[in-house]
Amino acid sequence: MIGAALLTRLRGLARDRRALGAVEFAMAAPFMILLYIGGAQLMDAISAYRKVVLSDRTLADVTTQYVTITQAEVDTIIDGARQVMSPYPTDDTTMIVTQIKFDDKGNPSIDWSRSNDGTVMKASDLDVPTNIAVPDTYIVLSQITYHYKPRVAATLIGPITFTDHIYMNPRRSNSVACSDCT
């Protein structure tokens, strides 16, 4: 008798569809929430990378418009490029602007280099593409390294390092002279 009642009850539960939507929602909700958070973080990371590219372009573009420049002016340009990164924090960002000189054979050497954190480019770091190595010319290289930290779910995604660099020719003269830069 107990077995028949239990069997009847189980058949009744199998036919009951009243809570089916709630069960399906409970199964799909974690996936949908994760998808939403992941999509939002992906868009934020893309936006941060775009800001890195714009800041790098700004750093090179403004520097190449000078004929002569000082360390203080380079620092001001770097600070301006940091403002382009807003609203992303730039505490852990390295921005370097370097002028590269090519000798009469097209061999590169560093004329001067300046950064926001004291890191300067060394001769051993030079990796100039051969197609831009024109003998007896100068070129300005700007580089940015940005450590993106997601605002939401940072432990799931972890930090991402974005880097960008751009080469530009001086615009108003053959070189951008900086007497007090190293």
Image (cartoon, rainbow, N blue to C red):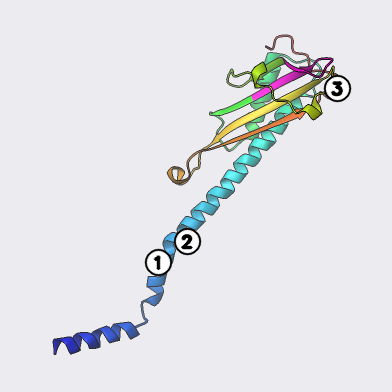
| Direction top: furthest residue | 179
Categorize mark 3 by other alpha carbons within 10 Å: few (<14), some (14-19), many (20+): few
Are the residues at dot 2 and dot 1 in contact (C-beta closer than 8 Å)? no
Q: Which residue is mark 2?
A: 32
- From the viewer's perspective, is residue 94 above or below residue 15? above
Callout 3 amino acid: Arg
**Tag on residue 44?**
none
**Residue 152 in the image, given as x and y percentages of width and height:** 47, 46
**Residue 17 in the image, given as x and y percentages of width and height:** 37, 82
- From the viewer's perspective, is residue 53 above or below residue 64? below
Are the residues at dot 3 and dot 2 in contact (C-beta closer than 8 Å)? no
Q: Residue at x 59, y 19 (%)?
A: 119
Q: Which residue is mark 3?
A: 172
Categorize mark 2 by other alpha carbons within 10 Å: few (<14), some (14-19), many (20+): few
**Residue 33 in the image, given as x and y percentages of width and height:** 46, 58
- From the viewer's perspective, is residue 30 above or below residue 77? below
Q: Residue at x 69, y 36 (%)?
A: 54
Chief SS of the magenta region: strand
Pick the front one: 110 or 15: 110
Q: Earlier in the sequence, mark 3 or mark 1?
A: 1
Q: Which residues are magenta?
A: 96-110
User: Which quarter of the picture shows residue 161?
Assistant: top right
Q: Which residue is mark 1?
A: 27
Marks 3/1: CA distance?
64 Å
Q: Is residue 7 left or right of residue 161?
A: left
Secondary structure under the numbered disc 1 in the rendered image:
helix
